Every structure is written in C-alpha cells, then in structure tokens.
Amino acid sequence: MFENPVTSSPHLRKSGSKSLFLDPGGVSEMGDLKGSSSPLQITTMVPSPIFLWRFKVVLFLFWALCCCKIGWDSVMRMSIDLRDLFLYEAFLYYNPLLLVTMMVWLWGVNLWVFSQGSVNYAKVFDLDHNHLTHREMWKCSMWLTIIVPTSMTAYLYLYSHGEVSLAASQPVLLYIAFALVLIFPFDIFYLSSRYFLLRTLWRIAFPLQPITFPDFFLADILTSMVKVFSDLERSVCRMVHRQVATIAWFEADAVCGSHQIAIPLVLVFPYICRLLQCLRQYKDTKEKSSLLNALKYSTAVPVIFLSALKYHVMPESWTSFYRPLWLFSSVINSLYSFYWDVTRDWDLSGFTKIFKFSRPSAISYLFYGRQWVYFWVIGSNLVLRCAWTYKLSAHLRHNYITVFAVTAMEMFRRFQWVFFRVENEWNKITKSHPLAEISLEEDKLLGSTTPHDV
C-alpha cells in the first residue's frame, strides 16, 4: 500500500537523491529526462471573463444596496423639521462630483460610438495612439461611481450618529483627494491625459494663443457644467468658513448663499471664456461667423446678472421691471443658442453616419438612417435649451432636486450635441484633405511619441 512513494518535495527527499516527476509512463528520474516522454503540464485554474464580470456585478449591486440602506436609515434618524435641510447640505457638497461622474460616463459612451463608426475622433482632436479609449473612461467613471456615493454615505451615517467632526471631514478629504490626483506630477493615473486636460483648461481661461478645436469644444462643455462650478464654489466657501456639517444652516447660507456676488461671477465665467475665444478666432481668421458666435455667448450674461439682481433690489422693482427684462433676455438666449446648434454646430444636410458601425449592431440598426433621430434631437435640444435658462437663474434655484434634474438633462443635451458636433468637424476635415493625405498624417500621428491625449 505504501510502496514506491512518489514526490518531488525537497522536504521529503533524501539528501543527494535525484528529483522525481510524473509522466505518462510512470515514475522516471530527472537524469532520464531526454529518453523519456514529456511530463504532464499542470495548468492553473483561471476564472472565465464572464464569471469575473458577473462576480463584479454582484459585488457592485451589494455595495449599492448597502449604501442605500445605510443612507436611508441615517436620514430617517434625523428629525422631520431638520431632514430637508440636512439633505440639502449633503447634496450641496456631493452634487458637483456626482454630475462630473455622470459626464464622464456619457463621454465614454461618445467615444465608444465613435470607435464603432467612421468618425475618427482621434484625428479630430489631434490625439496620438496613447489617448484614452472608452474602456479607460468607463474605468475612471466606475471608480468615481464607487468613491463619491461611499463618501456621501459615510457623511450621512456619521452626522446622523453624532460624529459631526468626522462627518465634516468626509467631503473635505474627498475634494482634496480629487485635487491631488488631478495635479499629481508622477506618471500614474494617466499623467499625459491629466496634463492635456489641465493645459486645455489653462488655454480656455487665458485664450492668448490661436484657438484649436479641443479648446472651444471643452469650453462649450464647461458652459453646460456651470451648475457644477456654482455648487463647487459654495461648497468650498463653506469649507473655508468651517460651516460643513453644522446645524446653523441659515448662518452658513448667509455667508455662502445664493445671494452672494460670487455666484453670478462663477456662472458667467465659462461664457466669458468662450466669448473671448470667439474674439480671438475672429482676430486670426477674420470670419464674421466668429463675431456672431461671440454674440451668442454674450446673450447669457444678462440672463445671469438680471436674475442675481432679485436679491439686491426692491420686490416692486423686480416684479415691474427686472423680471420682464430677465424673461426677454432668457428667450433671446435660448432661441439664439438653439438656432446656432442646428445651423452651425451640426451638419443636418444629410443623414448622419455616426451610427453607421463597421459591424452589425442593434444600436446601429435602431439609429442609423432613421428620421425620428433628427426630430428627437432637434425637438429635445429646443426644449432643453429653454429649460437650461432655469439653471442660469440664481433666484430659481431653491428646489435642489429640480435643479439637479435640469442640470442632468442639460448634460444629456450636451451628450447628444457631441455626436453631431464632432461629426461636423470630421466632415470638414475629410472635405479639405484627401483621404490619402489623412491616412499619411494618421501614420505620423500614431508614430508620435509626444504625449497628447485626453
């Protein structure tokens, strides 16, 4: 029963003995390796990709359920008269990062659609072969989806259980962490992409050089994210004045509320940057369309500042003079912006090829060559352009849930806008350059070692 024990363990072999191994013919010595048959290969069991994907989904759903449960129980512990103010403050701190997370998800979808179709977005944005694909964007957005709600849940739990100082540290640490990751100088966390983003933001804030497509493309997206900057300013203001996780909500609102002059300045800043870009573009190209585009962004200025005047004028003056003027400027801004989207930013002269995928797909079958896509895009763009005026007006931002919904819809409108705007730019490139020349430039671009990605 125990004859001829077979083992290769050095702890069980005698000193100086030869190693043994298993082969199809039985037991052989290492010295007879050349004359014997090949040994059996012992493979490592690796889970299948489908199993790993399902396991991740289960973990994500479990995490989401735990966050919802803990957050709900924490809110229910608060008294009814303080519950709304408690939620409003928590929402104020985490609303900017939640909206950024949503925008990153949507940008990943944009990149995925472009990669499936004939629109070469890498050429449009002048990117090299190291640019982030939709997979990397979704990976970043997944981490954001996990980190931000987890911090928010910790804030709700700690505050409702009396740990006020620990609760106040949650949004502060989260903001500091995001800022450090963005400016981290070492070659991790997509350094070249972060550098490209920061450099483009610098070019937007100080348009002293010729304007490129990534410059005004990102600036247009920032105009849809003014809600993020507005709430970000109020959140940082409360952090600086140590008004985070405090029961003195009215005192904090008196210092960092909707009436302060910084709010309209933050709201108007992306539009001023975009206006200056148009003026710089006119200086370089002498195209009158640049001046008309600058006029479009200037129409947002009276909407923002007339709304802010409600906190600084008498109620009678607001009702009789300033509110009608604000309504008139809002209509002009919405209709002008809608007209420019449809006639200048988009090319609706023919059927779009955005959803003409290289491989058969249900999405391509549903969207490509369908007339309803145009009716939907034009109609929804008009409605959401008008609704976006709600967010530009500080005196209307009292219901934070409504404001969040309007901002999310504006980001969805911008998500739709990206498809047609990038395709329009790609059509201009293909018309002005022969396909052979474009292929040659792409080969040079792919061979470039200069980091320039997004």
Image (tube, helix red, strand yellow):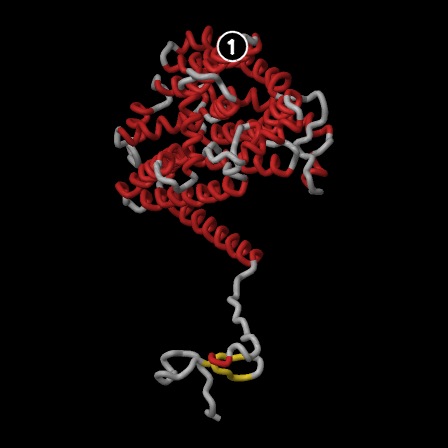
Instruction: Give the structural element (helix, strand or loop) at label 1.
Output: helix
| Residue topped by disc 1 | 282
Q: Position of residue 188 (x, y in %)?
A: 39, 42
- Residue 173 seen from this side: yes
Foreground pick, 56 / 204? 204
288 horizontally vs 75: left or right: right
Rendered residue at 30%/34% (across/down): 244
Residue 95 placement: quadrant:
top left
Of residue 352 and residue 264, the one placed in the foreground of this image is 352
Name above or below for residue 129 compared with residue 317. Answer: below
Q: Amino acid at mark 1?
A: Tyr
Between 125 and 35, the one nearer to me in the picture? 35
Binning the other alpha carbons within 10 Å of mark 1 as few (below 14), some (14 to 19) or many (20 upward) gives some
Give the answer, above or below, for where 1 lies relative to 119. Answer: below
For the point 38% across and 20% down, the residue is 263
Query: Percent from the top left, x then y, of residue 134?
Result: 54, 40
Q: Position of residue 118 (x, y in %)?
A: 66, 33
Res 303 visible: no
